Image (spheres, rainbow, N blue to C red):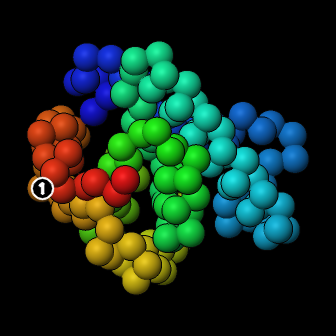
Amino acid sequence: MAERLPRAARLDGDFISRLVVSGRVGALGEPAEEAAQQVELCNRNLCALANNFAGAGFTPVIDWVIPDREQLDFFVSLLPDLHVLFVVLAPGIEACRYRNTIRAPRERFDFDGYEDLGLGMKRELGGVGWWFDTAALTPEETADRVIQEAGHRAMVS
């Protein structure tokens, strides 16, 4: 999507979280308190980058899982001068699993919690933003639709 906009930056939460190379604890890792602190650090860094890019005239596109209302509210609070659009790419669990298998080996991830994550997100965020079923779309078609429709479907702030 960011490639299709005239001036944009893709801010990849996975990349930002992997900047921690020693002592890294993944979002679902142990100890849970350290995992939560590192998720918050990643979120703060994503928002700082988004504000910096926006201030320089770029559209920041944050690519990251926002699992609950608390984290979405945290993002919005750290992006006070930006119009925040929240798009959940929701192709369904089977499509997610399949797409993971066709990724480059370096980009694949082991995750067994699709059902729990999906249910939790729907419970807390089901009426927020735009839940976009992309199962039948290519990445290019998805990007085009998001660019065309997110402004009136995904507004959060």
In the rendered image of this protein, does residue 10 appear above or below residue 28?
A: above
Q: Position of residue 123 (x, y in %)?
A: 40, 83
Q: Nearer the viewer, residue 97 or 53?
A: 53
For the N terminus, the quadrant is top left
Q: Residue at x 23, y 24 (%)?
A: 4
Q: Residues within 10 Å of mark 1 (few under 14, many from 20)?
A: few
Camera sees residue 81:
yes
Picture quadrant where residue 146 is located: top left
Q: Work out whether 119 lies above or below 45.
A: below
Is 65 displayed left or right of 125 in the figure? right
**137 is higher (above) or lower (below) than 73:** above
Total marks shown come to 1
Instruction: Residue under label 1, please give it.
Output: 136
Relative side of 64 to 33, left or right = left
Residue depicted at x 50% and y 70%: 68
**Image position, residue 56 (x, y; %):** 47, 16
What amino acid is found at the position of numbered circle 1 in the picture? Ala
